Image (cartoon, coloured by chain):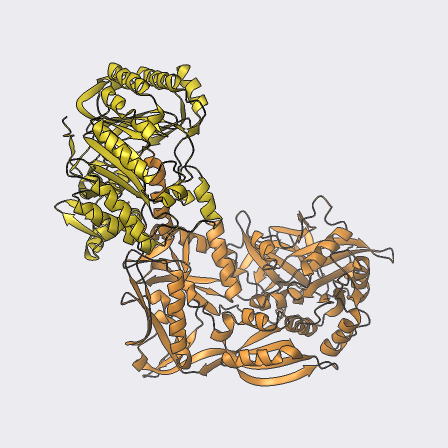
Chain colours: A yellow, B orange
Amino acid sequence: MDFAGPIDPLTGTAAARFGLYVHFPYCLSKCPYCDFAVAVVRQVPEERYARAVLAELDTRLAAEPSLRERSLESIFLGGGTPSLWHPRWVALVLEGVAARLKVAPGAEISLEANPSVADAERFAGYRAAGVNRVSLGVQSFEDSLLKALGREHTGPEAVAAYEMARRAGFDVVSMDFIYGVHGQTRAQAESDARRAAALGPEHLSTYALTVDRESLAVATPLSRQLDKGEVVLPPDEEVVEMTKAIRDAYGEHGLLRYEISNHARPGYGSRHNALYWTGGEYLALGVGATGMLLTSAPGERPSGYRYVNLRGSDAYMRAAEEGTLPESSREELSPLELFEERLAMGLRLRSGVDWAAVCTRYGQDPEPRRKEIARLVQHGLARLDGPRLVLTEAGADVHSAISARLL
Amino acid sequence: MPADNAHIRNFSIIAHIDHGKSTLADRLLGATGTVTKREAQDQFLDNMELERERGITIKAQSVRMNYTANDGQKYVLNLIDTPGHVDFAYEVSRSLAACEGALLVVDATQGVEAQTLANVYMALDHNLEIIPVINKIDLPSADVDRTRTEIEDVIGIDGSSAVPASAKEGIGIKEILEAVVKSVPPPSGDPAAPLRALIFDSWYDNYRGVVTLVRVLEGTLKLKQKIKLWSNNKTFEVQELGVFSPFSRPVPQLIAGEVGVLVANVKELQDAKVGDTVTEELRPTDAPFPGFKEVKPMVFSGIFPVDSEQYEGLRDALAKLKLNDAAFTYEPESSTALGFGFRCGYLGLLHMEIVQERLEREYNLSLITTAPSVVYRITDSQGAVMHVDNPAKLPPVQKIAKFEEPVLTCHIHVPNDYLGAVLKLCQDRRGVQKDMKYLGSSGTRVQVTYEMPLAEVVFDFFDKLKSVTRGYASLDYELAGYVEADLVRLDILINGDPVDALSVIVHKERAYQRGREVCQKLKEVIPKQMYEVAIQGAIGAKIISRETISAIRKNVLAKCYGGDISRKRKLLEKQKEGKKRMKQVGSVEIPQEAFLAVLKTEE
């Protein structure tokens, strides 16, 4: 399989320029920290949902026929729990996409899966359907933390699921972890990291638990508990130390931090996620999915729009089946807004971002930012790699504060 | 309307803050039918939004009421409102000068307060007939007899005539109106004499220019009349005369004894100052009404826009504000830390807060105010004298031969139980005791007189006094000149660079303590930054205190995948907006409140 994605010149990161995100909202239970669009149902309408997603695609293509000429470089099936979708319906969706849009040879096609044995039995089916990258939502190997996070699987099950993914023929396996959980010690975070890395995955996404309401799309049970003071997260200093310990443990196994929360073996960074960090365009289908498309001509100052689909699965399916766009909102994006995203997201990457070129491309004056950048470098929060501004490890820990200063 | 002035009564209400003046005024307007129920708006006379919110009267107002008394005759009662705060004592004196009588409102639960007393003496100076009203008699802790005795003992006026009332419950209102008719003398003055009228309030109206409230003492004000202002000899033509009842209503003339509105094409508020005398151009009065004085600011502070792009907006707003506030002054100032702004002068701290709030609220400006300063008198080694209202402008120490500060004579009324606390507070504020006497026969209240530096009083002394006496003490003060003092400038350095806008002048003995307190306070109010921040206090080249703000360790959105980048961008935009409310000094972002923090240190 050829994984050489195009290189984004402003960040030097391999990233898809046009991708597709398909959201599968169904779950067996809702995790208390999750703010994604999720529906917990007894009977998942697997086929109906698959057909609704394709119906939405038809509606979108009818509205924007030029999309048919574009080549998809990545497809990401996220959730929810996409591994609750039988491979037959995943195949239907992927075939349906391929029949309507161009899919570039060697496109990265990812699927998020629950690391339980029941789900893992379907892995071969997904592989056969064309999925070439699987991402397991392990979160932790510690049963006490899995419980705190409301996860139903156990540590050993996760290990078994990882091995089944390999046996199913996945050359690229990623796992998701969460740290900075209430009650978690640094030793536990480090132990999770070592065990994860020792399995030999190509990619690990490792997120500090985000519970504050402001950062979330909707309030979650955990954010409410935090507001009420029922839950106390480890102090920032401790979380920073965990970040460091995790990075070191991954590094020993050749998994390098290529984005604030993502580590990979060289050449295995997620093309699809990199698209979000490098201003790429993405079509999105399914409940609560967010897509972004540019409306500016190539060479013009970029501008475009971002849409968010309905978060209710029934309302979504009805709208899609009726042939209307199942959107809940649409937001115009000005060159300034796209600039802010491009710069802030670019600073998340370990390859850095050619900040001056970003300014020029999006019509912003680089001059007023020079002094701040010199100061960041002087204080060891960033360094310059040629034209690219790269945050150091210390800088990455305060990425938001730095971005807010440079916007 | 009676053509003679025998049926006119001009009176005001003297009351301590919170003793119920505004509520009583509302009741009087209601009882005379001046304000119908539908129009009734609590605290009718306080018509500025800010006044209502703070429950204080800033600008004096006047309302004409028609009242048929028990004797069957119709009277015109002019209620002249007076400001109720120490910052506005001069305006109070002018309002009182426009009256023949005053209602003295005393809270039946609190007794006579020092500030009330000051206003009563002011009223007696103007030969006003005083009618005591014992208010809040509906409260369980009300003690009418004791209050009556105190009125006699403390003020020395007949307490037996005092009217018991509850403005809140509407008790005693009729009796108060009858007392006004019976006890307050009608105004004298000959409508045919040369014009002599007193300006007791003025403000700027966008459509009519300067509007003044006048009391005609002699003669008659007529439309189209050519008038002259005594203090500046400027002449104007009367364009509009009116009365408030309660809304402005035009009248053809105002005769001796009457109170009303005068509009005469005056463009600048400075040309129609409170206390000035209006007379006829062709037939001037032989002498002005005495007691006119220019109100001078006592406290100065810098006002700077947080965003330098708001400088023009600030300048325009100050110009407009100045139109309505003759006591307020401003001139351009520049600070190395804060850029371009203005040095503003105020009567006192309350005045300062009101100006700032109005600027921010009415003109939508985001401002930084520096710590207020009094005006110091410096004599340099060559013998030249200068006045310095800005610590940043202080000459180098070696060039100062004599450093003088303004002092006040302060009269404090306090129940005996809290005397010790008050004496200690005054001592701590470098006060020098001048007098102490027990008031009345019961010996439960004391009046202490101190000479105290203005700088020590003007800031939070009043709040401190209230807190150490649980609100029972009251304060009145007057300027008593300059005295030499051992003063130094305390500078604050942030990451090694002095921030001029944070400098304050302090007494040498307190400098070390203040230096420590200011650094601690700044550490509290300056948020953690991306870099470590060192805060130092210095006197000259000598560092006397230091605090360090450690750098933030973690400020990052962990999850940035999935397409919902808009929300993340908005979070960053919000964070960026938050920075706009702070001033970047070097690499450090300093919030607005830090510049006032030097004041608000705990002792």
Q: Position of residue B44 (x, y in %)?
A: 66, 52
Left/right placement of residue B244 relative to residue B500 reads right
Q: Is residue B186 left or right of residue A2?
A: right
> Can the viewer see residue A275 in this picture?
no
Residue B21 falls in image quadrant: bottom right
Q: Locate residue A362, reporting x and y percent.
A: 23, 36
Q: Residue at x 24, y 33 (%)?
A: A163
Judged from this view, the residue extending furthest toward the left is A386
**Image height of B432 relative to B204, above or below:** below
Q: Residue at x 44, y 52 (%)?
A: B317
Question: In the picture provided, is B201 more to the left or to the right than A271?
Answer: right
Of the pair B358 and B248, the residue shown nearer to us:
B358
Q: Position of residue B494 (x, y in %)?
A: 30, 65
Q: Is residue A143 visible?
A: yes
The structure residue drawn at horizontal position 66% and vertical position 54%, both measured from the top left corner, is: B43
Q: Is residue A192 above or below residue B142?
A: above
- State the residue at coordinates (14%, 30%): A4
Q: Quadrant of residue A126?
A: top left
